[in-house]
């Protein structure tokens, strides 16, 4: 078989299993009302949880940055691509996350695939990784020389057993702060305690927690009242509630210094463009100055949980991610299309993002949704699922 024939066969298999994925195209900014594939929809799918992707103040700072600095950054951070803006952003991230220092990566995916191999770079090291960790953590583990041990999802007893079994000389526990497809929150206080007892480091991916949980949206540490020093490696993205692009790591000055010197995805890639960096700076300032945005999002989460209970769907999510598990791939896809016809966009998540037979509609909320938007969603869900 030649390559074309192989591809046709493989695509045929994907389609037969209802796992074929298509690009949907937006032709307007990503706010709660947008246009997808030419149709006006109410969006319940955005990671722009605070609804800031089309914010005037933030856009203005991005445009100003283009005027002053141009478009591309023209080099990697360690050559000629390190602008005063990058330094300012790192300081802002550290302040926002209340850590000593921060280091910027080009995206969250590159952060995870850069941090883990740099920190866990010999065979004596063991990584303990939650079964539902994000794919970028999984890939970071694959790139590392360390042994990876998977523990059952958010199951601290299983984690403790596995650590006892393996008896690592050194290593790290890594977990999502908020799990991206289930919307639940890691049992961090217990993980931190266990890590202290076993002298392991703790790494948390706060992609879906930053801007969402904790009183002022600082993420899982604030949510649990943990100190920044309890979490050795706090990772996050600038692409979700912060409506820009980039990944980051917060931690000690030594941690950031070491990653700057050893993380391949940091070293071997051109730095983020000035306009994007400026957007991140502006967004962090905006969020710090508008904690009521975070409160609005948290109120929406509580309101949707209540509304779902009324139509017989149990939901206890404390985060902006509210999965409605359907199971069957074909049924989930049918519900997705019904909702789309009614002007609601909620994505259908299937294998390989989640396990086979665990297909789901994944609702995400924004601070800008109104109660009547959420009422309409509930009404449409009721119609689509019955
Ligand atoms: C989105 C996401 C990432 C990747 O971040 P990008 O900036 O989009 O590359 C990493 N981890 C988790 C948990 C995510 O949800």
Image (cartoon, rainbow, N blue to C red):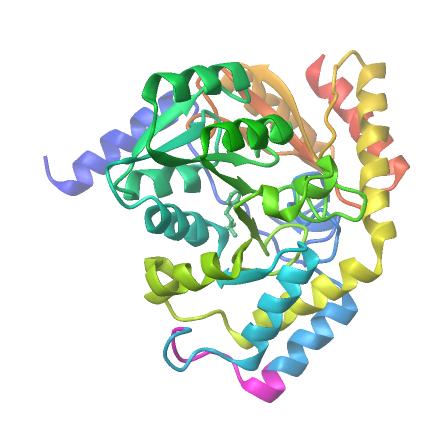
- Who is closer to the viewer here, 279 or 221? 221
Give the x, y percent position of residue 216: 79, 49
* Depicted 297 relative to depicted 150: above or below: below
User: Does the magenta-highlighted stretch encompass residue 309?
Assistant: no
Q: Quadrant of residue 80?
A: bottom left
The quarter of the rendered structure image containing the C terminus is: top right
The quarter of the rendered structure image containing the N terminus is: top left
Give the x, y percent position of residue 315: 74, 20
Q: Quadrant of residue 100?
A: bottom right
* Depicted 352 relative to depicted 366: above or below: above
Question: For this view, does 23 lie left or right of residue 122?
Answer: right
Give the x, y percent position of residue 345: 67, 37
- The residue lying at 81 percent from left, 43 percent from top is 215
Residue 352 in view, yes or no: yes
Residue sitting farthest toward the left: 1
Question: For this view, does 232 lie left or right of residue 308?
Answer: left
- The residue lying at 60 percent from left, 47 percent from top is 229
Q: Magenta segment, which residues?
A: 66-76
- The residue lying at 33 percent from left, 44 percent from top is 120
User: Does the magenta-highlighted stretch encompass residue 72?
Assistant: yes
- Who is closer to the viewer here, 232 or 151? 232
Magenta-colored segment: predominant secondary structure: loop
- Who is closer to the viewer here, 386 or 229? 229
- The residue lying at 44 percent from left, 18 percent from top is 356
Residue 213 in view, yes or no: no
Give the x, y percent position of residue 206: 59, 43
- Who is closer to the viewer here, 321 or 221? 221
């Amino acid at each position: 078989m030649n390559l074309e024939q192989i591809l046709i066969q493989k695509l045929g298999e994907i389609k037969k299993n209802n796992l074929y994925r298509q690009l949907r195209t937006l032709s307007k900014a990503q706010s709660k009302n947008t246009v997808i594939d030419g149709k006006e929809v109410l969006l319940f799918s955005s990671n722009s949880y605070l609804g800031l992707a089309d914010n005037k103040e933030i856009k203005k700072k991005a445009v100003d940055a283009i005027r002053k600095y141009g478009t591309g950054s023209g080099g990697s951070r360690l050559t000629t691509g390190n602008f005063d803006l990058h330094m300012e952003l790192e300081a802002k991230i550290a302040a926002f996350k209340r850590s000593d220092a921060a280091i910027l990566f080009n995206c969250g995916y590159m952060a995870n695939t850069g941090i883990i191999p740099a920190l866990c770079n010999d065979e004596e090291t063991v990584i303990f990784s939650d079964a539902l960790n994000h794919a970028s953590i999984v890939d970071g583990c694959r790139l590392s020389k360390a042994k990876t041990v998977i523990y059952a999802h958010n199951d601290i007893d299983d984690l403790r057993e596995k650590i006892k079994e393996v008896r690592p000389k050194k290593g790290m526990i890594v977990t999502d702060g908020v799990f991206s497809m289930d919307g639940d929150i890691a049992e961090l206080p217990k993980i931190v305690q266990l890590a202290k007892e076993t002298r392991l480091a703790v790494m948390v991916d706060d992609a879906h927690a930053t801007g969402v949980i904790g009183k002022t949206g600082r993420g899982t540490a604030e949510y649990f009242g943990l100190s920044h020093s309890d979490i050795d490696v706090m990772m996050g993205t600038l692409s979700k509630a912060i409506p820009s692009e980039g990944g980051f790591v917060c931690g000690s000055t030594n941690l950031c210094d070491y990653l700057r010197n050893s993380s391949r995805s940091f070293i071997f890639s051109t730095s983020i463009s000035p306009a994007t960096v400026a957007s991140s700076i502006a967004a962090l300032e905006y969020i710090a100055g508008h904690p009521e945005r975070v409160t609005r999002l948290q109120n929406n989460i509580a309101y949707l949980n209540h509304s779902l209970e009324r139509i017989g769907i149990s939901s206890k999510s404390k985060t902006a991610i509210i999965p409605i598990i359907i199971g069957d791939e074909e049924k989930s896809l049918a519900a997705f299309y019904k909702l789309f016809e009614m002007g609601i966009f909620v994505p259908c998540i299937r294998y390989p993002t989640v396990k086979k037979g665990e297909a789901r509609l994944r609702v995400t909320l924004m601070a800008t949704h109104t109660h009547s938007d959420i009422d309409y969603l509930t009404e449409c869900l009721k119609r689509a699922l019955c």
